[in-house]
Image (spheres, grey):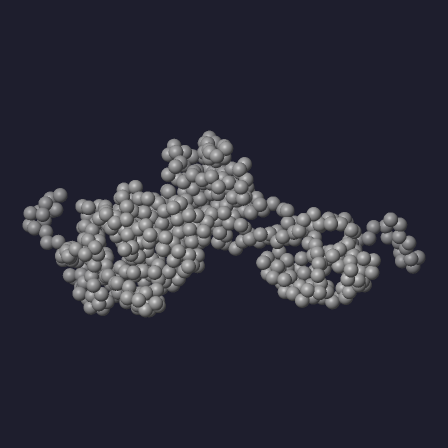
Amino acid sequence: MTVATPSNVQKVSDPDAFKLRGGSFTLLVLQLIDLKDPNFFHWLLDKISQAPNFYRHAPVVLDLEGLADLGPFNFAELARRLRQHQLVPVGVQNGTEEQNQGAINAGLSVFPMWRAAKPIEAPPTPEEPPEKAAQEPAPTPAEPGHAEASGSKVVLEPIRSGRQVYAQHGDLVVLATVSAGAELLADGHIHVYGTLRGRALAGVEGDTSARIFCRSLQAELVSIAGHWLVREDMDDHLIGRSVQIYLNGDLLVIEPTN
Amino acid sequence: MSKVIVMTSGKGGVGKTTTSASFAAGLALQGHKTVVIDFDVGLRNLDLLMGCERRVVFDFINVINGDARLKQALIKDKRVDNLWILPTSQTRDKDALKKPGVEKVLDTLRQEFDYIICDSPAGIEKGALMALYFADEAVIVTNPEISSVRDSDRILGVLASRSRRAELDMEPVKEHLLLTRYDPKRVERGEMLTVEDVLEILAIPLLGVIPENESVLRASNLGAPVILDTESSAGQAYYDAVSRFLGETLEHRFITPERKGLFQRLLRRTA
C-alpha cells in the first residue's frame, strides 16, 4: 500500500517505532435481540457471573442483526454500560448503514457481515460424572480468544490424598507420585511417571480411546470413559508394574509395558 | 424398628472409627442387619479399618448428590454376614454433607437395616453435627483423660440441643458412655482418670470399658475390626459392650490390673 508522505516529514523506509502485523482472534459476539428489555443488563450480569474470569475484560462484537428495525440508537451509552459490566465492546457487525455510522462515531469498528457458527457458551463448570465434583478451583477457563486451546496439564509435585486434579479438554501428566485417596481426572489420557496409588479416571467426558499410563500400578481405581476396575479386581501380578490401560469394547485392559 | 446410632466424642484420636467398626461388626455378628457410614468426609478411614478400601467405587457423597444409587455404594463385608459399609469421599469436604441428602440416605437405609452406625468425625462442626443430627442413640467414646472427658461433655450438650430429636422436642437421644484406651495399671498409679471419675463428670450410663491393647493397632493395620479378634481383651470388651447395648446384663471386665500369679511371673522371667 502506498501512502502519500507529507513532504516535510523525512521519509523513513522502515519505521522502528512500531510494527504492523496481521493477527486473527476469536471474539465473543453479543447478539442483541431486544435492547429495550428492562431486564437486559440484569440477564447479562447473570450470565457473566457464571464465569466471571472468562468474561472479564473480554472483547466483544455486537451483532446488530436482530435490531434492524430499531434504527440508530445511542452506541456510546450502550458501550459505556457494557464496560461497566467489564465487557469491552470493540465493534459491530450486521448493522444497518445508519447503525454502522453510529457505531463508528462511538469509536467502534465495523466488522464484515458474518454469522457466528453457534452460540458460544462460557466454559461449562465441568458437568460432573460420578465422583468428579471439582474440589480444587475449577480449571481457569482459557483466555477468550484461545477457547479451543488444549486443556492439558502437567503436574510436577506429588499429589496428596484428598486432592483432585482435572485436565479438562486435555491430557494429564503427573511426574510424581499420586497418593492413595487422590484423584486424577482427564478428558484425554493420563500419564503418571511416579507411583499411582490413588484413582485415575481418563476420558471422563466419554472418550473411549483415552488411555492411562503409569510407571507403577498400585491404583485404588482406574477408569476409562466410565468403565472402571477397583484394586481388588486387578490381577496381582500387574500390581507395581509399568502398565498401560485402555478400553477394548466394554473391557478395560491392563497391559504391562515392560 | 431401625435405629440410627452415632459414634461421637468431640475429641479426635479417641477411637470413634475403631469403635464404629467393631460395634457394627458386633451387632451384625449377633444377627442384626447393620450398616456403618463414614461421616468423616475428606479424611476417610473407616474403609481401611474394615479392610474394604480396595472395593470402593462410589461413596456416600455420590449417593447424596444423586451421582450413584445407594446399592452401588454399599459394600458388603466379606467376613461378617449382615454387615455393610458405606464409605465416604476423600476428595470432598464436610460441606458436601447436605442435611436433606443425608436424611434421604438414612431414610432409605432405615427401610432395610436394623442398625445404622454413623461414624462421626472429630470436632463439633458440620461433619460431626450431620453425623449426630439424625441419631436415635449415641455412643460417646471417651478416653480416661481430662481433655477427652471435657470434649465429651461438650458433645453431650450438642446432642441435647442441636440434634433432630432436640429440635423437634422428641424423646432425647439415648446416651451411652464407652470408655476406650483404658489402662488399669496407669489408672492405679493415678496417671489416668478412673471409671468412677469419668462417670461422675459425664453422668451417663456406662456401656463398656475397652482396655488399651496392642490388638487394636494390629487389627486396624490388618483391616479387620478388633471385635473379630476374640482372643484379645479389647475384642472381648467390645463384644460385651455390644451385648449390653442389646439388653444383656454383663459385669464389666478389664477394669482392674491383671494380677499375675507367682507361676506366671516365674514363667515370664524365664521366657
Q: Position of residue B190 (x, y in %)?
A: 18, 64
Please state if A217 lies on the left or on the right of A38 as rendered: left
Quadrant of the image for the N terminus of chain B?
A: bottom left
Residue B15: quadrant of the picture: bottom left
Q: Position of residue B220 (x, y in %)?
A: 29, 48
What's the residue at 28%, 49% (across, down)?
Answer: B33
Q: Position of residue A48 (x, y in %)?
A: 62, 60
Q: Residue furthest right?
A: A7
Q: How many marks?
A: 0
What's the residue at 80%, 60% (across, down)?
Answer: A99
Against B228, residue B167 (above or below) is: below
Please state if A21 lies on the left or on the right of A191 as rendered: right
Q: Position of residue A104 (x, y in %)?
A: 80, 60
Q: Residue furthest left?
A: B262
Please state if A77 lies on the left or on the right of A196 as rendered: right
Q: Residue furthest top?
A: A258
Quadrant of the image for the C terminus of chain B?
A: top left
Res. B87 in view = yes
What's the residue at 50%, 35% (across, down)?
Answer: A247
Res. A83 in view = no
What's the residue at 61%, 51% (across, down)?
Answer: A142
